[in-house]
Image: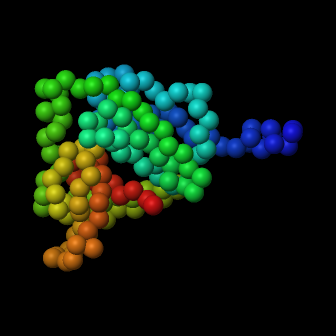
Amino acid sequence: MSLSLAILAAAPFADLAAIDAQVAQFTGAPAGEEGGAVRPVDRRLRLQDCEAMLDLRWNTASRQTVVVQCPDTDGWRIFVPVRSVSVAAQAEKQVPVVNRGDSVAIAVAGRGFSVSQPGEALESGSAGDWIRVRKAGEGRRQSGDTLRALVVRPGLVRLSLP
């Protein structure tokens, strides 16, 4: 029994403040503010530290909840409720920050590494939208050569690691 307690005590847990920061970046607003998480992630959670980059996505088209998922084999998933946005603010937020044909940096990051390369947006999108992109200089290729990436900010999209 004491051995299992020692193992549990030594197990690294996910940094909940870092998860809050990623949710804020994804939604474009800090926790507690309109459009951000209703509240920070519950500090009582003991989530296994994730080796891969976290995957964040909207749970539904209504954008009321962000799904935060650890894609590791024994990963976890939490749902973070989002504070609703006024109609005027929502219309402003829907403005594309990346337009079709724009040059973008395609980034991918994981534990201990970060890589980016130039690319081209094949669709327009707002921050938090998933769009199709391709590597720069690819020209017209087949549909299998395109990637789906998350719009982070103007000129930057992020790939999700499997």
Asked whether residue 114 is in view, the answer is: no
Query: x%, y% of residue 26?
Result: 33, 40
Give the colouring mode of the picture. rainbow
Q: Residue at x 26, y 41 (%)?
A: 61
Q: Position of residue 12 (x, y in %)?
A: 66, 43
Q: Position of residue 136 (x, y in %)?
A: 22, 70
Left or right of 41 in this view: 63: left
Q: How many marks?
A: 0
Q: Residue at x 33, y 54 (%)?
A: 158
Picture layout, residue 106 above or below residue 150? below
Q: Does residue 86 show up? A: yes
Residue at 38% from the left image edge and 24% from the top image edge: 38
Nearer the observer, 137 or 32 = 32
In depth, the one of 78 and 152 nearer the eye is 78
Dividing the image into 4 quarters, which one contains the N terminus?
top right
Q: Residue at x 28, y 29 (%)?
A: 35
Q: Is residue 67 above or below residue 84?
A: below
Res. 96 image quadrant: top left
Quarter of the figure with residue 2: top right
Residue 84 drawn at (x, y percent): 27, 25
Front residue of 104/95: it is 95
Residue that extends furthest to the right in the rendered view of this protein = 2
**Image quarter in which the C terminus is found:** bottom left
